[in-house]
């Protein structure tokens, strides 16, 4: 069974940094692309970032480009999101998501999310 | 980026009725690279379809997907009580990946 467990969320002041982590299990991690998708409670979904199986290809939403960096450690079955210069509008539930394939395509399995709140 | 517009915003139906959800793209979605998701309250989304009409694992056949170009449709032939949820479309034709704003299927 695919399991994705996010961690690292919390309350952070505007302009500060935060690193989210996702521990993956139940599948061959290094064969699949991974993503971060966020959702403001009660609102819609926003793709934040994705990374291919071998880290050769990465992508970002325009709203986070230049501030967020996605990375993965296939040896540790882990996905990361480094978030800098955080803004109030980054407040959301951040989901770690497994792709159906090795490149950034569709969102197959989802974690339960970690809540990030940006506020002074 | 490709903007996806879903309609209607809310669909009020009785169990057993047919649901037709629309997703329109601001430009052509190459090779029907469109997916549909279902989200119930307090849960993460679940993949229903990818490639416009390829059903994901475990999805009942009362759900069907269709469309091409800029117009796509998710149909539920007979809505079951467990189908009341919010449905999102998502394109994987180009970066950044984008979602529609969602259609809520609620009990009438």
Image (spheres, coloured by chain):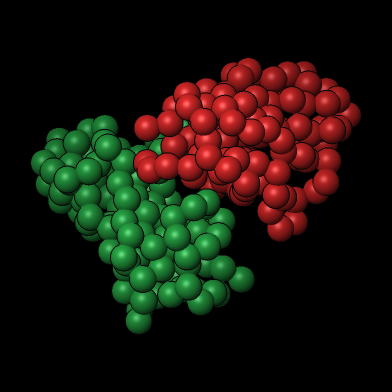
Chain colours: A green, B red
Residue A64, horizontal then vertical, whole percent: 24, 41
Residue furthest toward the left? A15
Which residue lies at the image location 43% right of the left edge and 51% below the top edge? Answer: A95
Q: Where is the N terminus of chain A found, in terms of image quarters? A: bottom right
Residue furthest toward the right? B16
- The reply, left or right, for residue B22 in relation to residue A65 is right
Q: How many marks?
A: 0
Which corner quadrant of the image does residue A90 belong to? top left
Q: Where is the C terminus of chain A found, in terms of image quarters? A: top left
Which residue lies at the image location 76% right of the left edge and 32% below the top edge? Answer: B75
Residue furthest toward the bottom? A75
Which residue lies at the image location 48% right of the left edge and 35% below the top edge? Answer: B99
Q: Nearer the viewer, residue A36 or A16?
A: A36
- The reply, left or right, for residue B84 in relation to residue B31 is right
Residue B7, horizontal then vertical, whole percent: 61, 19
Q: Nearer the viewer, residue B4 or B103?
A: B4
Residue B95, horizontal then vertical, whole percent: 38, 43
Residue B57, horizontal then vertical, whole percent: 71, 58
Residue A76 seen in the current view: yes
Q: Nearer the viewer, residue A48 or A106?
A: A106
Compared to B2, does A64 lie above or below? below
Which corner quadrant of the image does residue B24 belong to? top right
- The reply, left or right, for residue B23 in relation to residue A117 is right
Compared to A6, does A66 lie above or below? above
Residue A22 seen in the current view: no
Which residue lies at the image location 17% right of the left edge and 46% below the top edge? Answer: A67
């Amino acid at each position: 069974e695919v399991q994705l467990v996010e961690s690292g969320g919390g309350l952070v002041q505007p302009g500060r940094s935060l690193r989210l982590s996702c521990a993956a299990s139940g599948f061959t991690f290094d064969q699949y692309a991974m993503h971060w998708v966020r959702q403001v409670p009660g609102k819609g979904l926003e793709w934040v970032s994705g990374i291919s199986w071998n880290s050769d290809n990465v992508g970002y939403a325009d709203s986070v480009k230049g501030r967020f960096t996605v990375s993965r450690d296939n040896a540790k079955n882990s996905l990361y999101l480094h978030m800098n210069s955080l803004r109030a509008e980054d407040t959301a539930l951040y989901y770690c998501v497994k792709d159906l394939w090795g490149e950034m395509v569709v969102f197959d399995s989802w974690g339960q999310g970690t809540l990030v709140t940006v506020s002074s | 980026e490709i903007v996806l517009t879903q309609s209607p915003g809310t669909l009020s139906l009785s169990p057993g009725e047919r649901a037709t959800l629309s997703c329109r793209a601001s430009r052509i979605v190459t090779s029907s690279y469109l997916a549909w998701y279902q989200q119930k309250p307090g849960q993460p989304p679940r993949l229903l379809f990818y490639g416009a009409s390829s059903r994901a694992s475990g999805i009942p056949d009362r759900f069907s997907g269709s469309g091409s170009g800029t117009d796509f449709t998710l149909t539920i032939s007979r809505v079951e009580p467990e189908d009341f949820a919010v449905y999102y479309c998502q394109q994987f034709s180009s970066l950044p990946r984008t979602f529609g704003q969602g259609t809520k299927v609620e009990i009438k």
